[in-house]
Every structure is written in structure tokens, then in C-alpha cells.
Image (cartoon, helix red, strand yellow):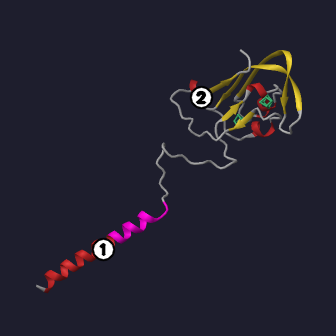
Amino acid sequence: MINYFKAIIVGLWSVVVGLAITMKYFLAQKYTMQYPEERWTMPERFRGQVKCNASNCISCMYCVNICPVSCIKLENVKSELPVKVTTKEGKEMNRIKDVTNFEINVATCIYCGLCAEGCPTGAIDMSHDYEIACYSRKNMVYQWADKK
Ligand code: SF4
Ligand code: SF4
């Protein structure tokens, strides 16, 4: 008889202990993220997908020449009229060439950030976009243009 009540008390106690542990984690800070409904806010200096604002590009070819894996291609034509663009330092300068094709192959890009760091106008930039998986290599070539 004593063993019977002892077993009931032990059983109830184990339920109380189990619920206490559940409540502890229920009220604690959550670390699980409900992706894709929730997303990380990337750190300011995170280097994600390289993006280009072709209308701000002065075709200086710095990025094309500095890229260690040669994944940038740039084609341009002479502008009919010079266009004013602003440099990173806030100075105005004339853009005398229009970009007809600015291409980055992200399949070979190593996200080193050298292109974005030295671009005088900030036309090329490392974005915070990290969802760049795709099913075809062809889709890994990103293109921009100011003029077709
Ligand atoms: S991040 Fe580096 S590898 Fe990628 S395009 Fe720029 S220079 Fe090239
Ligand atoms: S470094 Fe900047 S301005 Fe020069 S070609 Fe590249 S994107 Fe254009």
C-alpha cells in the first residue's frame, strides 16, 4: 500500500519537474528563426551579392582590372552628352561613356569586396542580399546597363 502511494507521489513530482523545465525554456530568449518568414539583419560590413548602379558608373575599368577572378565584364559607348555623376567624396564629375553592359558572374565571384572598395563613384556595391542560390549557371550572370 505504501509503495502504491509512493509511486503516485514520484509520478506527480516528475510531472512538476518536467513542466518546470518546459516553462523555463518557454520564457527564455528564443534563438530559433522561422525562416523564410523571419530573416537575419546582416551586419553593416557583410559582403553579399555584388550589385551595380550602371547610371553612376564612369567606365574607369578599376573594378574590371582589380577583380582577382576576372568575373566582371564592362562594355560602353561614348555618351552623346556628358552626364554629371557624384563621387563617393561628394564631388561632381562628367561621365563621358554610357554603360551598355555591366556583367558580373557570381558563380566565380569570391566576394572579396575589392571592386566595391575602390569604385570612385560607389556604382558597384556589396549588398546584404545572401539568397542567391539558383538552378542554372546561366542565371548566375547578372547584367546591368545604362543604355542598350
Ligand atoms: S567581390 Fe571580388 S571577386 Fe567579386 S566581383 Fe568584386 S572584385 Fe571580383
Ligand atoms: S570601378 Fe565603379 S565607376 Fe569604375 S568601372 Fe567599376 S563600377 Fe564603373
Q: Amino acid at mark 2?
A: Met
Tell which residue pokes out farthest to the bottom in this image. Answer: 2
Q: Please provide percent x and percent y for residue 138.
A: 57, 24
60 vs 27, left or right, is right
Say how many tags the image has: 2
As for residue 64 lying within the magenta part, the answer is no
Local SS, label 2:
helix
Mark 1: which amino acid?
Val
Q: Which residues are magenta?
A: 19-29
Q: Are marks 2 and 1 in contact (CB under 8 Å)?
A: no
Q: Does 61 sit above or below residue 27?
A: above
- Badge nearest the viewer, 2 or 1: 1
Q: Residue at x 37, y 66 (%)?
A: 22
Q: Is 22 displayed left or right of 90 in the figure?
A: left
Relative to 44, residue 9 above or below: below
Residue appearing at x 64%, y 36% in the figure: 49
Q: In the rendered view, does 78 fall on the left or right side of 102?
A: right
Please tell me which residue is depicted at 83% across the width and 15% down the height of the picture.
Answer: 78
Q: Nearer the viewer, residue 38 or 70?
A: 38
Closest to the observer: 66 or 52? Answer: 52
